[in-house]
Each structure stands twice: as structure tokens, then as C-alpha cells.
Image (cartoon, helix red, strand yellow):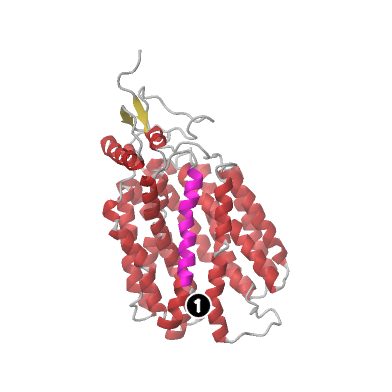
Amino acid sequence: MADSNPVYTLDEALTTIGFGKYQGLLLAYGGLGWIAEAMEMMILSFIGSAVQSEWNLSPAEKSFISTAVFAGMLVGAFSWGAISDTYGRKKGILGVASITAIAGLLSAFSPNYTSLIIIRCIAGVGLGGMHIFTSWFLEFVPTPNRGAWMIVFSSFWTLGTIFEAALAWIIMPRFGWRWLVALSSLPSFIVLLFYGLTPESPRYLCTKGKIDEARIILKQAASLNGTILQIGTLVSDQFDDHDTVFTSSENTHFLSRKENTSSSSLSILFSSRLIRTNLLLWFLYFGNTFSYYGIILLTSELSSGQSKCTTNTLNSEKSQNASLYIDVFVTSLAELPGLVLSAFIVDRVGRKLSMVLMFVLGFVLLLPLMVHQNEILTTTLLFGARTFISATFVVACIYAPEVYPTSARTTGVGIATSIGRIGGMICPLVAVGLVNGCHQASAILLFEITILLSGLSVWLSPFETNRKNLADTIVL
């Protein structure tokens, strides 16, 4: 006998609605959040030398500006993830955008070094939660071609780095670092300006039992996309109409999704079902972050022709400063081919194989730098290595939110991001220190080992998320 009151799940609803104007607007809003983070991070490439000159700082004090930001991000990544899983994606977005915008602007008015360190650390706390934008947007995207659309979303980070380099090129020589810092906070304020129009994630609402609110958002999405939401009753993906448990298989979700709804996100994350996944993702994020920022730093160390370990003569300080903006701008463009490549293969070969292949290519391109090469070849090899390592970073930022269930998604990604920030903090101290000490081979060997182990952590990961529906909860 036919069911007079059919039911449908959120994934079925999103597939029916399709990807249209509604998701396009969300893409623009979430992408703006990533532009804001990228610009705030890229500031570190430009203001250090200017601040050092203005306040007569030591090299260690100059480096500590970046360390303070990463320390704040380390705290913020986990904290905002937990807040988002508990109180909603919207509240998380409001918090991170507010702190980033206010602290970012106040940094421009810092009267001394100590105040700058404190304010930039607070800005880092906000920046640490920007990963919420990824989970928020992910939860609106239908399963088909989800990987490609998340690559498009990730491209906003690259746009932010390119825009910040161009802005610094224009602003710094004429108006100084304070104007650059102030203008770089504008994207965060724009995020706040449009916050009132931002919908809550319907997937989050379903996990909290707010089915009616989720259905209203889905109807709005269908209306704007020119589609019709199916007739029937929306049910949380945690349960079907017979209250059966979803189990893992090739044709269903990769994690069981029924649990005691009173379980906290931390109890879910540290359950026996996710321990292996956690450890492998943590190392992936650590290694990927270490390699990504290391290659960026190596670009300036090895391709500038100014290394004290070679016989090249030093350029004038004015020439060095002028080329800084050009070098950062050009090397930022290396991420564009990586985005194109990852968008092409991520839904075709899967998340895991995509990352493994690009780790291997990055490894191969760095290998010749075990010995000194001429400047053109060095720059070319580093440009290519950044292309592939940045691409693995993009895919990892898609893979991690897909692995974790909705009830612990932003907390899980937040912890992984926090551990990744540790890699970003120690990278300049270890790798760049080796290069400055004329130990280029040792520095490259360290990166090669890290890349190999990162690829191995992906290979050993138990889940492939390609074309799988997102899980809401797991069996504890």
C-alpha cells in the first residue's frame, strides 16, 4: 500500500533543489569570508619589515608578530568549531567575523610593538574560526559534483592572496603599513554587513530537531533556484521512518548516523569509531600546513639570489623592497593551476587519490633542490611545488568536513586546523633556520619527508568521501 505521507531526507531535498542562484549567493558570502582570512594572513608577508624599521625591532621580535597570529589561530580554531557545533553555524560566523574585523582595524592604530602583538593575537583568534565558512557552505551543496563546487569555494582564498599582494603593491610605498592593515579589514566588515541575510545550515537545524525551520530554508532555496521541493515530510538524516540504523556500505553513507542526540561533539570525536581518522587527519593538516608555508618561505629564501650561502652580490635595499611585492604577487599565481587541476580530478578519481597524486608531484619537483640550482630553475621548481601542495591543501579542506558527522563537523575540523597551525608556527623556526644556516639540503629533505608522510596518512585513511552523502551522527 502506498505511503500517503511520504518522507524525504535532507540529501534528497538538496538534490531535488539542485545547485542554483541560492547556492551562488551563499558561495559569494562564504567566499568573502575566505578572502578576509587570506588577506589578514598575507599581511604578515608585508608589514614585518616596515614595523621592524619603524620601531627598531630585532629579527626575533619581527618574527614573533607571525607567531602571535598563529598562536591566536591555534586557540580560535578549536574554540569556534565547538561553538559552531553547539550553537549553530551562524553564531560561529558572527563571532569570528566580529573579532577579525575589529581587531584587524585596531591593529592599524597600534601605538607600540606590545599592543600590536596583543591585537594581532586577538585577530588570530578570529581567523582561527574561519573554517566554519567551509562547513557552512558544504552543508548546502548537493552530493553530485560537491567536490568541484568546493574547489570553486576554495579559490576565494587564492583570490584573497592575490588581491592582498596587489593592494600592498599600491598602498605600502605610498601610505605605509597602517593603511594596508586598515583596508585589509574591510572584507570582514562586509561579512558583518550582510550577516542578517545569512541562513542557518538546514543540516545543523535537522541535527537539533528543528525540522520545520530547516524546511522553510529549503523552500526558499527551491523558490530562488526555480525548482520545487518535493511533497511530504522532511526527516532528519539521523533516522528513517522506521527508526533503523544507517550502516556503512559502498552505496550508502560512509558512517553510521544514528546516536544518542545528547552526546557532545567531543565525545563523538574521541569515540573509538573516529580515533584512527583523527590521528591521520591531524598529521595531514600538520604536514600540509608545514609544507605549504615552508614552500612560500623557501621561495623568497632560495629564488631571490640574495642567499649569504652563494657568491651572488646583494641588491640594493630599495630594489629588494620593490621586488618583494612582485615576487609575492607572482608566486601567489602558482595556486591557480593547482585549483584548476584539483577541480578537474577531485570528483573523477576521488579525494584520497587526488591528494596522493599531487603530494607525489610536489615531492618530485622539490627533489632537485637538494642541491643548489640556478635562480630560474629554482623559481620554476618552487612555483610548481606550490601548485601541487596548495592543491592538496584545498582538497584536504574539502575532505575533512566530509569525513566528520554534522554533529561534530566544525569541532573536528577546528581541532585538525589547530594542529595544522602548529606546523605553521614551527616551520619558519626549523626549515627557514636551516636555509639561513646554509643547510639547504637538510631543509629540503625535511620537507620531502613531511610530504611523503602526509601522502601516507591520506592513503591509510579509512574513508573515501567522493559522491557520498554527508553523515549527521555516528554510532558510539
> Hey, which residue is sitting farthest front in the picture?
226
Residue 338 vertical position relative to residue 124 in the rendered view, above or below: above
Report the front residue among 168 and 293.
168
* Horizontal arrangement in the rendering, residue 442 relative to residue 475 (left or right): right
Name the quadrant of the N terminus. top left
Image coords of residue 203 (percent x, y): 36, 40
Residue 239: in magenta span? no
Question: Which residue sits at x=43%, y=60%?
Answer: 74
- Residue 427 at least partly seen: no
* Horizontal arrangement in the rendering, residue 302 relative to residue 279 (left or right): right
Image coords of residue 39 (percent x, y): 43, 66
Q: Residues within 10 Å of mark 1 (few under 14, many from 20)?
A: few
Report the front residue among 73 and 39.
39
Q: Which residues are magenta?
A: 146-166
Amino acid type assigned to the residue bearing label 1 in the image: Ala
Q: Main secondary structure of the magenta part?
A: helix
Q: In this figure, which residue is indicated by the disc labeled 1?
A: 60
